[in-house]
Amino acid sequence: MKFFRTLPVFALFLSLAVSAGPFAQSRGNLRINGKVVDEAGQPIAEAQVRAAKKGEAQPEVFTAKTNNKGEYTINGVAPGEWVIEAMKDGLGVKEVLATLADGDRTKTVDITIAKPAPTVDPGVEINAEDQRGLALAQAGKFAESRKVYEDLLAKHPTVYGLNARLATMYAAEGNGAKGLEHARMALEKEPENVDFKVLVAELMMDAGDKEGGQKILETVDLAKVKDPRAFTNLAINHINGGKHVEATDLLTRLIAQFPNEKILLYYRGRANIVATKLPEAKADLEAFLAAAATAPQAADAKKLLDQLNKKN
């Protein structure tokens, strides 16, 4: 029993003896000293200095701190190649290599910590250029706006929203195929992005692929949609295809989510006419005219109301 009690003590001693081996290779009777300064040559006080012998599996780390003159000293090191690091909060870190020979009693290693260059937030440039691109588009200068986004995309290829912006510019220029290409690039990179899904679906429907666009829109959570245009076009397709139930249901959900989009009342009125729900159609058209009497669709709404009133 005594043997089993003393065995762990022996094992611990052996472990300590083995682990002390690598450290012994780092220790000697040489000295490293020097100064830590900034780019202007001014001493840096209270900088942390660390030194470790290069190539050691478990190097011992020697530490020191600079005084008010930026001076430091590390004693008791062995000959060999050393990695020396100086660090100061707020300034940065600098690492240097130094070789200590057997004949060197003291090795002077001065270290300059250069203040890191200020980081530039790419979002600042992107947002500013995005506003410029949008302003050009609103002025009808779609080619110039597209150039803004092409330049941005070349600098920031992982900002996939720029592909979406390019898609809208190409579409505005009448190049729907190129627009759809960029929209699909954006959606491929972010397949769950609602805005990208809606854009691809809208461009597909504009290109005549109404069924393909509808399939994509059916995967979209309507509550996350910011612009009802693509879904309004889908409702119009339903109306033209005689699918009044689908059209009415979709438009009712759109009206609830976008109450200020009065044009939705006009289209639901038309859907109700197709469904022969004439009282509901009349109510929608009257509400539309009361809220948007100068809208482009107002004349047609009045004509439809006159026809409904004659049937009564």
Image (cartoon, grey):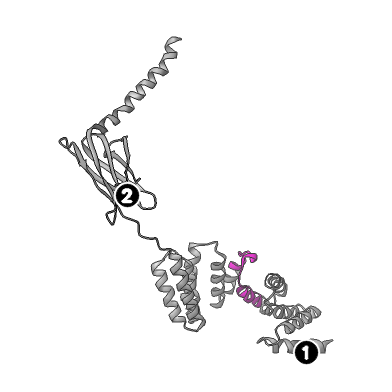
Real-space Cα distance between discs 2 and 1?
A: 87 Å
What kind of element bears circle 1?
A: helix
Give the residue furthest to the right.
Answer: 312
- Estimate the x, y position of residue 240 in percent, counting from the top left: 66, 79
- Neighbour tally class for label 1: few under 14, some 14-19, many 20 plus, Cα within 10 Å: few
Looking at the image, is mark 2 or mark 1 earlier in the sequence?
2
Residue lying at 39% horizontally and 52% vertically, measured from the top left: 90
Q: Is residue 201 magenta?
A: no
Residue 67 located left or right of residue 233: left
- Estimate the x, y position of residue 178 in percent, counting from the top left: 46, 75
Residue 289 shows in the view: yes
Q: Is residue 230 magenta?
A: yes
Name the residue beneath numbered marker 2: 44
- Estimate the x, y position of residue 149 in percent, counting from the top left: 44, 73
Residue lying at 57% horizontally and 75% vertically, measured from the top left: 205
Q: Quadrant of the C terminus?
A: bottom right
- Neighbour tally class for label 2: few under 14, some 14-19, many 20 plus, Cα within 10 Å: many
Name the residue beneath numbered marker 1: 306
Where are the magenta residues, as a range?
215-237
- The answer to whether 110 is drawn above or below residue 138 in the figure is above
